[in-house]
Amino acid sequence: MSSVANDNRAPTAVPLITGATRLYGIVGDPIAQAKSPEIYNRILHAEGRDAVLVPVHVRGPSFEQVFPALMELGNLDGLVVTLPFKERAMAYATTLGTTGRLVGAINALRREPDGSWTGDMFDGMGLVGVARHIGTPFAGASVQLVGAGGAGQAIAFSLAQQGIGRLTVTDLDAAKVDSVVQRLGNEYPACEAHAGFADLAGVDLLVNATPVGMKPGDGLPLAIDSLTARTRVIDIVPRQDATPLLAAAAAKGCIHAGGAPMVAAQARAVLAFLQGADTPETNSK
């Protein structure tokens, strides 16, 4: 008899992909660094769902051709969107959740039973979860946010919802910063919003919401000479090792967290959305 026939060992718990398996994709450029496939697929497997999240590398210049073509796949139920496409993906949503509409960017799209697509933004929810986990005192806190793109704006609004007292925002695109500051003032007047750089010695939380730190050779997203151990630091860049900012924060004795915990904090919320959970208020475009 063959050894295979007599192998009584328990089968390895590997999800079986069949012709009926439903697909989710995570789209980005680059995508190899993304931790979402590991995190989301563990959850899907634990829940017993016949579905899988796969990484999809779409090159920036081809996004407008490739992305809508992906949405035509018959067995695709949703897409997660990462850098640098969160704003560009918004154009392909039939309906927007409140956060996505307010921010002007989305990081998740789901196919509805009628074939239309609903999009919303969950980055802020993930950041707040990580900030709470590392003991950030939200009430009246002073925050320095670097980056006013889709993720940065979602983070800004979510932090304002937590009752922070002051938010200082900087970005290479001054128009984006001015827009965020104005909208924060309109939506959350109790939170003082400013453009530029705060004195980090008086900041409770420093957040990097830019891609700086993703590529080898990247430096710091801002000067941190005045940073002290009292400030908590979060870098949303999803790297296996520490980003330059997190390494510098550790050297200064700061409590800090990287992009992987943020992905984990928002994964369940995104999966619930992709599987049909309602979002607060949706608006047809």
Image (cartoon, rainbow, N blue to C red):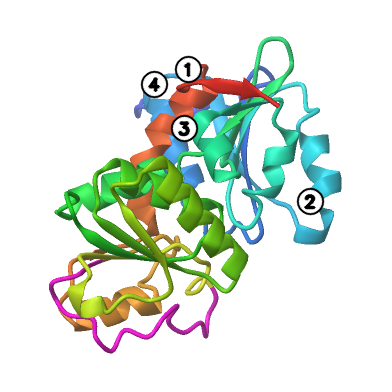
Sequence-first tag of 1 and 2 = 2
Q: Position of residue 188 (x, y in %)?
A: 36, 43
Amino acid at dot 3: Val
The secondary structure type at the circle numbered 2 is helix
Q: Position of residue 42 (x, y in %)?
A: 40, 35
Amino acid at dot 4: Glu
Sequence-first tag of 2 and 3 = 2
Q: Position of residue 66 (x, y in %)?
A: 82, 45
C-alpha separation, residue under disc 2 versus residue under disc 3 = 22 Å
The secondary structure type at the circle numbered 3 is helix
Q: Describe residue 109's horizontal placement relative to residue 212 as left or right.
A: right
Sequence-first tag of 4 and 1 = 4
Q: Mark 4 — residue?
A: 47
Q: Mark 3 — residue?
A: 270
Amino acid at dot 1: Asp
**Range of the magenta residues?**
215-232
C-alpha separation, residue under disc 1 versus residue under disc 2 = 28 Å
Q: Which mark is residue 63?
A: 2
Q: Is residue 72 above or below residue 214?
A: above
Res. 172 visible in picture: yes
Amino acid at dot 2: Phe
C-alpha separation, residue under disc 4 versus residue under disc 1 = 19 Å
